[in-house]
Image: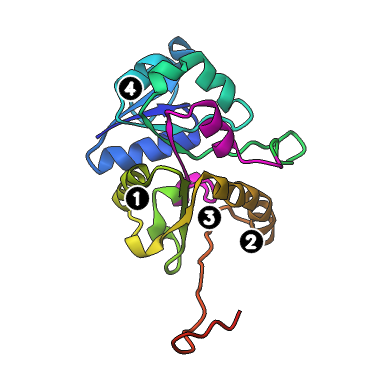
Amino acid sequence: MKIGFLGTGNVARALATGWAAAGHDVVLGSRKPGEREGRPDGGHPVTGLAEAVAAADVLVNATPGTASLDVLETIGAAALADKVLIDVAVGLTGDMRLSHPGVSLGEEIQAAYPDLRVVKSLCTLTAAVMVAPHLLEGPSTVFLSGDDEPAKRTVAALLTDLGWPATSLLDLGDIATARGQEHFALLFLGIAGALGTHRFNVRVVPAVPTGPGTDPA
């Protein structure tokens, strides 16, 4: 599969390396590709954003969440139509507040580009853990949100290529559920401060079944 990245930062490079190792073709898309010469891009090709989008089956939004909509506008709706977009971005202000507290970035992207098949995922993890779940002590959970079921299946398959077992994947529902994923960024920062590291994840642990027809909630 051909995967085009919007962005060339740590997240884009980590995911590109992980999916390239799984046999996918990857390319990093930059707003200023000429300025990337001599910079460490993990050996992955770097092109302009339009070129990265045109060649890709699946796109990854790894731009800063405060800039994502502006970046997508430069590409245009026609070029984005029918593409699957894995949105891993979260918008944070300089004082570490959510830049879109009443709605998720994933929803904003989907509303702006209705023909784009947006799936929110991986935004609850740091880059190193996204591509190396074996770094964690035991199983944990990765979330998916989106309106397009085939797109979510495509993303789920790509997550398994990164080493996430199917039992770790939790489909939260439509794109509106991306709000919960993005708001987790605030808790993520608190946990990271308490642990002294960003290399962790959470696990959803269901209640022990108590019998047919019962719901202790």
Residue 179 in percent (x, y) is at 61, 47
Is 171 drawn above or below residue 105 in the view shown?
below
- Looking at the image, tell me whether mark 3 or mark 4 is earlier in sequence order: 4
Q: Is 121 within the magenta?
A: yes
Can residue 38 be seen at all in this image of the molecule? no
The disc placed on residue 156 is 1
Which quadrant is home to the C terminus? bottom right
Provide residue 215's location: percent of width, then percent of height: 55, 82
Is 124 one of the magenta-colored residues?
Answer: yes
Q: CA distance from mark 2 to mark 3?
A: 9 Å
Q: Is residue 182 above or below residue 133?
A: above
Q: Residues within 10 Å of mark 2 (few under 14, many from 20)?
A: few
Residue 45's label in the rendered image is 4
Q: Are marks 1 and 4 in contact (CB under 8 Å)?
A: no
* Left or right: 144 in relation to 178: left
Residue lying at the far left of the rendered structure: 23
Q: Residue at image x 59%, y 55%?
A: 197
Query: CA gap, disc 3 to disc 1?
Result: 22 Å
The residue tagged 3 is 199
Distance between the alpha carbons at the discs numbered 1 and 4: 25 Å
Q: What type is the residue that disc 1 sits on?
A: Ala
Answer with mark 1 or mark 4, whichever residue precedes in sequence: 4
| Residue type, label 4 | Pro
Residue tagged 2: 195
Position of 58 with respect to 136 (left or right) is left
- Residue type, label 2: Leu
